[in-house]
Amino acid sequence: MLLFVMQPVWAQIDAIRQDFKRYGFAQYHGCDMHLLPSGREKMEDMLQSIENARFYVHVEYYKLWNDSTGRVFLDALARSVKRGVKVRVIYDAFGNSGKAPDVTREFVEEYRQRGVMMYAFDPMRFPYINHALHRLHRKIVIVDGVMVYTGGMNIADYYIKGRPEIGAWRDMHARLTGPIVDGYEKLFAGMWYRITRERLDSVAYSMQGCKTYIDERIADEIRSRGSEAFIVDRKPGRESKAIRQSYISCLDHARKRVRILNPYIILTSSVRKALRRTIERGVELEILLSHKGDHAISETSTAREVYNLARRGAKVWLYDGGFHHDKIMIVDDTLCTVGTANLDARSLAFDYEVNAYYFSPLMCRELNAYYEKEIQGSTLLTRDNWKTMYTRKQRRMGWWLKGLRGIL
């Protein structure tokens, strides 16, 4: 009986795995993921790892603001430099300009003087339209090749303190360990070479020491929790469909239930069709997002998108305790993803993104526990409460913005 019940699950897992291999996604075995479900937990854990770094720290962020959190983070990196640690930082020029507290030349020069190698990705220059589309939306911090921090959180005060207009900021980050870290190293090295023309494989530091360090710190943890994992990274022009392909494969092979937490659901046509196919097959589709968004356009467009899915049979939960910025999906309690990609055209069709996929019932249980806790403060969207939860102006704006879904 057990074999009879498990056979469809094994077939589903293998079908997704085969899709991922066919698409060329990098596969790794013996990988762990430790969840960090708040900005404070993420910063405390990451700062401790930076303080313990022996060889190097590599950083990529969409937003790395010149505020108290940004300075705490960069001060920790600068202290590591004094211990002989190599620190390389890439930040997106668009994500850190035109708003306060932005990253000024003086701010960057201050930390360069303290030894932090800090560079902007694709500075905004005339004609600006040439630089507006493909932005670096990844969030990556690699410490000594031992661990990588990634997920939805940037470096800014509001990831810890929230925002007055929307309340607490809810988000998910993760500390990844095991062979999957090598894949993130390659992503960073490629971006570093693009910006600086320095090949990191030629940089002199002791890799033998790093391997010993890896064995000491995480070998036992990986042995007890290690799972199969894939990296799905989106690069404009080369792997431009990667994030969409990964979501569609998971949706098309789901058998029982799919749970999604995402702040911006302004879908491309292919992902929208896959979600509809999932509902039509009788798979339970659940979506959790915030009732109040951080941008009026994205809030109204997302509301219209999820309402249309709710009318087709999806369960849509609207969170009222702040703003959920997570990028999570759980498929049949077997496969899960945590990463940087939103479910909007920016992430699915334009920006640089990266998601980690884990074939792990254990990690799915941990994410399901988080999900179930969050829906306790949420309201189920229905036909009856659609007009009371969103104003007439919001409903109309969501309808009028349909034609812009491919670029929002």
Image (cartoon, rainbow, N blue to C red):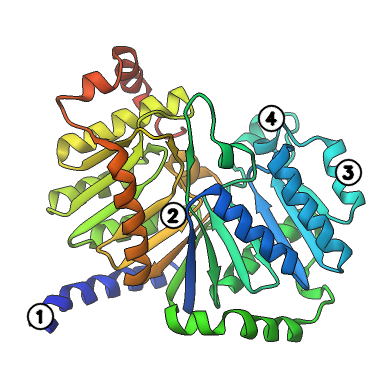
Q: Amino acid at mark 1?
A: Phe
Q: Residue at x 47, y 52 (%)?
A: 172
Q: Looking at the image, tell me whether mark 3 or mark 1 is earlier in sequence order.
A: 1
310 over 231 or under it: above or below: above
Q: Residue at x 48, y 76 (%)?
A: 31
Q: Position of residue 114 (x, y in %)?
A: 90, 53
SS type, badge 2: helix
Position of 353 with respect to 79 (left or right) is: left
Return the residue at label 4.
Answer: 128
- Residue 4 lies in quadrant: bottom left
Between the residue at mark 3 and the residue at mark 1, the CA separation in whole angstroms equals 63 Å
Return the residue at label 2.
Answer: 243
User: Quick check: marks 2 and 1 in contact, CB under 8 Å?
Assistant: no
Position of 217 with respect to 320 (left or right) is: right
118 over 250 or under it: above or below: above
Between the residue at mark 4 and the residue at mark 1, the CA separation in whole angstroms equals 58 Å
Return the residue at label 1.
Answer: 4
Judge depth for marks 4 and 3 and give the one in front.
3
Return the residue at label 3.
Answer: 109
Judge depth for marks 3 and 2 and give the one in front.
3
User: Quick check: marks 4 and 2 in contact, CB under 8 Å?
Assistant: no
Q: Nearer the viewer, residue 38 or 283?
A: 38
Q: Residue at x 44, y 36 (%)?
A: 323
Q: Looking at the image, tell me whether mark 2 or mark 1 is earlier in sequence order.
A: 1
Q: Looking at the image, tell me whether mark 4 or mark 3 is earlier in sequence order.
A: 3
SS type, badge 4: loop
